[in-house]
Image (spheres, rainbow, N blue to C red):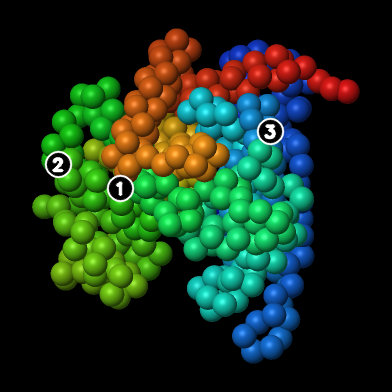
Amino acid sequence: MSISGKEFLDSAIQQFEEAAEILKLEEGLRELLKMPKRTLIVSVPVKMDNGSIKTFMGVRVQHCDALGPFKGGIRYYPTVTVEGVTALAMLMTWKTAVMNLPFGGAKGGVRCNPKEMSLNELERLTRRYTAMIYDIIGPHIDIPAPDVYTDAQTMAWIMDTYSQLKGEPTPAVVTGKPVNLGGSEGRAEATSYGVAVCVREATKKFGIPLKNARVVIQGFGKVGAHASQILYDWGAKIIAVSDFKGGILSKDGLNPYKVSEYEKKTGSVVGFESMKSISNEELLELECDFLIPAALEGVIHKRNADNIRAKVIIEGANGPVTPEADSILDQKNIKVIPDILANAGGVTVSYLEWVQNLQRFYWTREEVLNRLDERMVKAFNEVAEYQEKYRVNYRRAALVLAVERVVNAIKSRGLWP
């Protein structure tokens, strides 16, 4: 099951309202933060390989820049909606704030099916979309990054297009670029590394030994695959993984490196070494120590939350647990480490990449991951402190911390004119 863009936005606003209530925010500030600062909707005409012209809907939503330039990914997906992108932009505001990064929140998307498009078509789409949003992005204005079905190559096209229009090389306009074009070492696995650090810190917090901890991962894409390998290297037992076609289960544990090799050859994890095949729905309900939903939003909802048997959920995806599901999980005493903390490794290394681009000085992979590790641990502990201070769950604690930082910035800046 996936939720609509409107449902996703309603969930994001509801979660913000809960944090606002705890902080006793005045109505004016609530209304300000429930609406994005700017929404740009564009039509993106592209000449296809067969000579025809096809027009795609593109959008860039800039939610809040009180703490710094807008920051957020661009996704290519068949179900991209303005409402869904707006929800993701709002989540990015809270994510950068909870990590104490000098950024605001934004998100972009193009409604298309990249699996049905050639590389040349995707390049033309990307360059045209970049030209359409050129006026509202820039190294000190809004810095895009990869998201669902976009990658380092997509960012290279955006950077090159922007640089050509600007008339000068501008590597800092996007992050998540190829390393040979100013990308950061460690960026490819950054989100996954952040997820793994949250698992590691949660084992300390909740008294679950990391060695042989049973981990289930829904979504064996960029985030899920790397996270499974990092946790495997740290001694955890990966018992099930899945992709859009289905999942595989091995209660004795599986080798995610071998699964990844198999997936690259066949296009799916299903069928690996004759392991038991299970559906994505069944995978979510497996008994385990850590469940990592790393696919799309809304996969844990009011109809399946009561069947969840994980001790801790680490949100690798954006918004995988709905507010209704949150309430049910609270009653079951299942801890949820929220997306705005758990998957913030990507935007944190994006910040490090941006800093490197601006000063034209680059760090090694080890230096980058060490800086990321330090920031993730600090943010995890700050959220834990707020959880204890306000006696709320971890999602509300993270949101309260983030909203408080954004509100303090708005108050310090004041309103002009």
Amino acid type, residue under disc 3 in the picture? Cys
Question: Which of disc 1 and disc 2 is earlier in sequence?
Answer: 1
As measured in the structure, the alpha-carbon distance from the residue carrying label 2 to the one carrying label 3 is 40 Å
Work out how far the residue at label 3 is from the one at label 1, CA to CA, in angstroms: 30 Å
Left or right of 54, for residue 280: left
* Residue 64 numbered tag: 3
Rendered view: 199 above or below 411: below
Graded by Cα atoms within 10 Å as few (under 14), some (14 to 19) or many (20 or more), the crowding at tag 3 reads: many
Crowd around label 2: few <14 · some 14–19 · many ≥20 (10 Å): some
Q: Residues within 10 Å of mark 1 (few under 14, many from 20)?
A: many
| Front in this rendered view, residue 11 or 63 | 63
On the image, the x and y values in percent for residue 227 come to: 30, 47
Question: Which residue type does callout 1 highlight?
Answer: Ala
**Amino acid type at mark 2:** Gly
Secondary structure type for disc 1: helix
User: Residue 303's spot in the image, x, y percent?
Assistant: 46, 47
| Quadrant that contains the C terminus | top right
**Near-viewer residue (357 or 329):** 357
The residue under the point 57% across, 29% down is 102
**Badge 2 is on which residue?**
235
Which residue is labeled 1 in the image? 227
Q: Residue at the location (69% across, 40% down)? A: 141
